Amino acid sequence: MTDTEHGAPAEQPEGRARRTVFGSQHDRIMERLQALDTDLAAHIQNFAYDTVYDSSALDLKTQELIACALLVSLGSPPELRTHLRGALNAGATEEEVRGALMMCVPYLGFPRTVAGFEVLKTYLDAQERNQKKDKEKG
């Protein structure tokens, strides 16, 4: 039997999770982190994404839905926006993202959950505006 048959994750290309989560914003996010602190950027890249995310037994969509709920608990709108986009990039539907945010109500309360839904709405509204602009151009 292989490790994968025992539940261990299969080998993934380095940076797969980070590139999927960050999507088209990858370079901008990495530049922002580098500008804050190069060591911090390296830890986020090498540990959080290239180690924890890429070696988890959970699929990336599930990891991102959990990350969204955790970020609602922390009250971190910029990071929540990144991981909402990441969950959608990893294959989560809008309904699944909403479900993950709704799970915050009994554990975190309404104020934090409402704030999380506001971040989601702002992100989805921006996506819709961008799609309309693209249609008008093309």
Image (cartoon, rainbow, N blue to C red):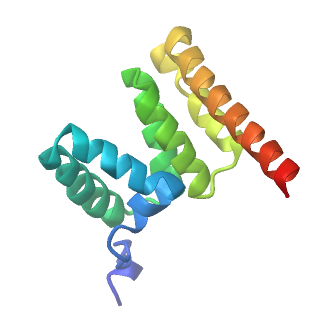
Nearest the viewer among 131 and 23 is 131
50 up-or-down from 8: above or below: above
Q: Quadrant of the C terminus?
A: bottom right
Q: Is residue 124 above or below residue 121?
A: below
**Disc count in the image?**
0
> In this picture, is 94 found above or below 73?
below
- Residue depicted at 40% across the width and 81% down the height: 5
Identify the residue at horizontal 43%, vertical 62% (top origin). 19
Q: Is residue 72 left or right of residue 97?
A: left
Residue 122 appears left or right of 138: left
Q: Position of residue 93 (x, y in %)?
A: 69, 48
Give the position of the N terminus as an image quadrant: bottom left
Q: Position of residue 49 (x, y in %)?
A: 31, 57
Which residue is at a point 66% across and 34% down the rendered structure image?
98
In terms of image quadrants, where is residue 118? top right
- Seen from the viewer's position, the closer of residues 84 and 100 is 84
Q: Is residue 19 above or below residue 82?
A: below
Residue at 41% from the left image edge and 35% from the top image edge: 79
Q: Is residue 1 left or right of residue 113?
A: left
Q: Quadrant of residue 102?
A: top right
Instruction: Give the farthest residue toward the left.
Output: 39
Residue placed furthest toward the top: 111
Image coordinates for residue 3, horizontal then vertical, percent: 32, 81
Q: Residue furthest bottom?
A: 1
